[in-house]
Amino acid sequence: MKFGKISIYIFISILFFKNVLFLHAEDKIESVPLINLEELSPSFEEDKDSFENAEEQKNNSNNFEKTAKKNIVKKSDKIYINIKALNKITAKTSDIRLLIGEKNIFGSLEIKGLKCQHSENSQFLDTVAYLQVKDLASKDNNQVFLFNGWTFASSPSLRSIDHPIYDLWIINCENI
């Protein structure tokens, strides 16, 4: 009978020490230092960025030579609207150089610039343009303008062009 009481004490003490060891094990867990995610750069984009930078430098040198030749030849009297266009599905942006009075197609949008000028505000200088935008994707004969009005370079959200796929905003006007 004595051995039975001793085995019970041994069993209870083993359970007690086992639980105490688990409690002390939690104190030994160290927290990992936090990593600032803004400092990390994704490795897959490094090669793509270096390739794009080399392409851009090559294109910029070619564009510089072309624009220098154009400026030497003669300054044109035609007014152009420079528009930045975004395809929201592919996340690709395009630069559109739109001549006043002519139509340009971007995706399913038909863009026509009617006027471009600098605002006559004494506080700050802003570029404004009068645009007409149609969505050619709809097959009905009653094509209504998706956007018909003035848009501002400084605040494109003031009069935005609402389209589920495309976004347009003016950058500036040339030859004003």
Image (cartoon, grey):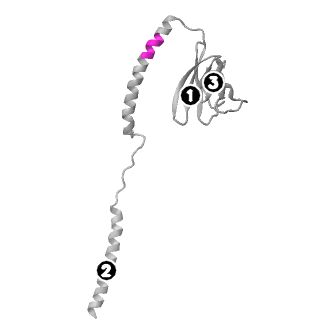
Horizontal arrangement in the rendering, residue 96 relative to residue 5 (left or right): right
Number of residue marks? 3
Residue drawn at (55%, 35%), measured in percent from left and top? 88
Answer with the quarter of the image where residue 48 lies.
top left
3 vs 1, front mark: 3
Query: Label 2 belongs to which residue?
Result: 13
In the rendered image, residue 8, in percent from the top left (x then y), is placed at 31, 86
Query: Label 3 belongs to which residue?
Result: 111
Q: Which kind of residue does numbered mark 3 sit on?
A: Ile
Horizontal arrangement in the rendering, residue 82 relative to residue 60 (left or right): right
Secondary structure of the residue carrying numbered label 2: helix
Which of the labelled discs sits on residue 5, or is there none? none
**Which of the two discs, 3 and 1, labels the residue nearer the N terminus?**
1
Q: Nearer the viewer, residue 148 or 136?
A: 136
Q: Nearer the viewer, residue 90 or 149?
A: 90
> Where is the N terminus found, in terms of image quarters?
bottom left
For marks 3 and 1, give the CA distance.
11 Å
**Which of the two discs, 2 and 3, labels the residue nearer the N terminus?**
2
Q: Which kind of residue does numbered mark 1 sit on?
A: Ala
In the rendered image, residue 159, in percent from the top left (x then y), is placed at 66, 30
In the rendered image, residue 121, in percent from the top left (x then y), is placed at 66, 20
Residue 63 among those drawn in magenta = yes
> Where is the C terminus found, in terms of image quarters?
top right
Query: Label 1 belongs to which residue?
Result: 85
Q: Which kind of residue does numbered mark 2 sit on?
A: Ser
